Amino acid sequence: MIEIENVSKWYGPHQVLKGCSLSVKKGETLVVCGPSGSGKSTLLKCVNGLEKFEEGKITVERTSVGDPSTNLPRLRSKIGMVFQNFELFPHMTALDNVCLGQNKVLRRSKAESVSRSMALLERVGLADHASKYPGQLSGGQAQRVAIARALGMDPVAMLFDEPTSALDPEMISEVLDVMIELARDGMTMMVVTHEMGFARKVATHIVFMDHGAIIEDVPKETFFSSPGVRAQAFLSKLLSH
Amino acid sequence: MFGNFDFQVIVRWAPLLAEGMALSLLLTGIAIIGGVVLGAVLAIMRLSPSRLLSWPSGFYVNFFRSIPLILVIFWFYFSVPIVIGRPVGSFYSVLIAFTMFEAAYYCEIIRAGIMSVGRGQSAAAQAIGLSSFQAATSVILPQAFRNMLPVLLTRSIVMFQDTSLVYVVGLRDFMTTADIVATRENRIVEMYLFAAVVYLAICFAGSMWARSLQRKYAI
């Protein structure tokens, strides 16, 4: 589904991604972790072309992201993305946020996009909040609306960029629960997160990054039972709190 | 203290004063529309990564913001007929002058409004597959417009006051008309007082409207 081959990226002289390769197969959940500044989010954003990369190749369902002839808006419409800061459109209600892409990109009728969006809001437990504006929602609610917005496009894969790190602790689980359910329903997911509990529950494999390079790419069991030296140091810092 | 004053003069000259006000309002209205449209084009040019677009727009803005409006009015009064090859009348030359002058200010207001919308918003718009044009019209500009509305209206109120400068090319706006009446009837205090009250009322109402719009569209 998602194939990343030898991807490198520079900001001026500074190399932020160093020959990264990984693959996510249909129905798998990949968790990407690592210290901040290790390039996890940058790599994730390369997958739907929000960030450019200079070397290597990324394909999503055999469509090359870096190819200039690729219709990026069309490709992006098939890949859901959830941001750290939700990025709901503040001038629209929750329902309109979920409908926008369906109307404008998928050209669904108003009635159809509303009924699908309401079903999705129901699924993330927010049908009662459909007519609220993002400013009236809590962080956890906003992030669930953002997940519904991404799902409204019937994506083939979902990208999550630290979806819980801007949330208050008591709201983290309501978002993770939605993500766990998605993973169990067979959605293909690439998740940048520090939530190791989530990783333990649903990850199929785990990638550990440091200084722009992929240090480990192993099945979940291996990662938690016998992590490499750097991953171990990282894990012990997470767990010591 | 108003015992010696004759405010009847306002009633006697009401038709002429109304004509002056009509000119002031018409000039302000058309220049707002023209200025915002031209200003939006300039703002989009100025935000473009292409220097070929951003540089001319930057030059335009800095140029018009560095010279007094009255000078621009004079210039267009004398130069427009030369460029077009025939006289266009004071009103049209003044209209072009105001539109082009105000566009420089509107450009900066619109640019600031667009920049006030976080970068994450355009990323989110792109991520659901919107084209750049769709992202601009559905996501970025509606928010930018809300953010810039109060400043845009404040600038327009200032422009309404500035229309009094058209007297230099012989146009009769509200202020000029009040001045003519004041001199002819020798009722200077009454007329200037009246003009001040009218400007105050209109501009105050405008400010209130700006504030209520801001509250209504607050995000």
Image (cartoon, rainbow, N blue to C red):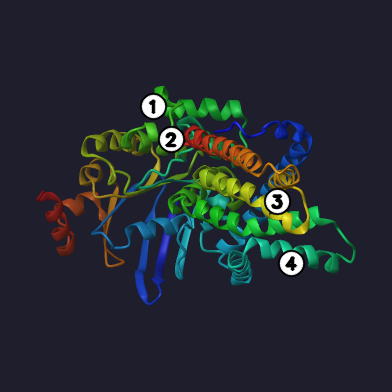
Is A53 on the left-hand or right-hand side of B193?
A: left
The Cα atoms of the two marked residues, 1 and 2, are separated by 10 Å
* Residue name at image x 34 percent, y 39 percent: A183
Q: Which residue is mark 4?
A: B75
The subunit letter for the residue under badge 3 reads B
Residue kind at label 3, given as amino acid type: Gly
Is A114 on the left-hand or right-hand side of B179?
A: left
Q: Quadrant of residue A47?
A: bottom left
Q: Which residue is mark 3?
A: B34
Q: Nearer the viewer, residue B55 or B9?
A: B9
Label 1 residue SS: loop
For the residues beneath circles 2 and 4, the answer to whether they share a chain is no
Label 4 residue SS: helix
- How far across and down, in percent of the image, does residue A223 sit? 20, 54
For residue B218, above or below residue B171: above
The Cα atoms of the two marked residues, 3 and 1, are separated by 44 Å
Residue kind at label 1, given as amino acid type: Leu
Q: Nearer the viewer, residue B89 or A155?
A: B89
For residue A135, above or below residue A227: above
Is A132 on the left-hand or right-hand side of B56?
A: left
For the residues beneath circles 4 and 1, the answer to whether they share a chain is no
- Along the polypeptide, which appears first: circle 1 or circle 2? 1
The Cα atoms of the two marked residues, 4 and 1, are separated by 61 Å
Asked if the residues shown at circle 1 and circle 2 are in contact, with their CB atoms under 8 angstroms apart, the answer is: yes
Residue kind at label 4, given as amino acid type: Trp
Label 3 residue SS: helix
Q: Nearer the viewer, residue B49 or A177?
A: B49
Rendered image: mark on residue A126: 1
Q: Which residue is mark 2?
A: A148
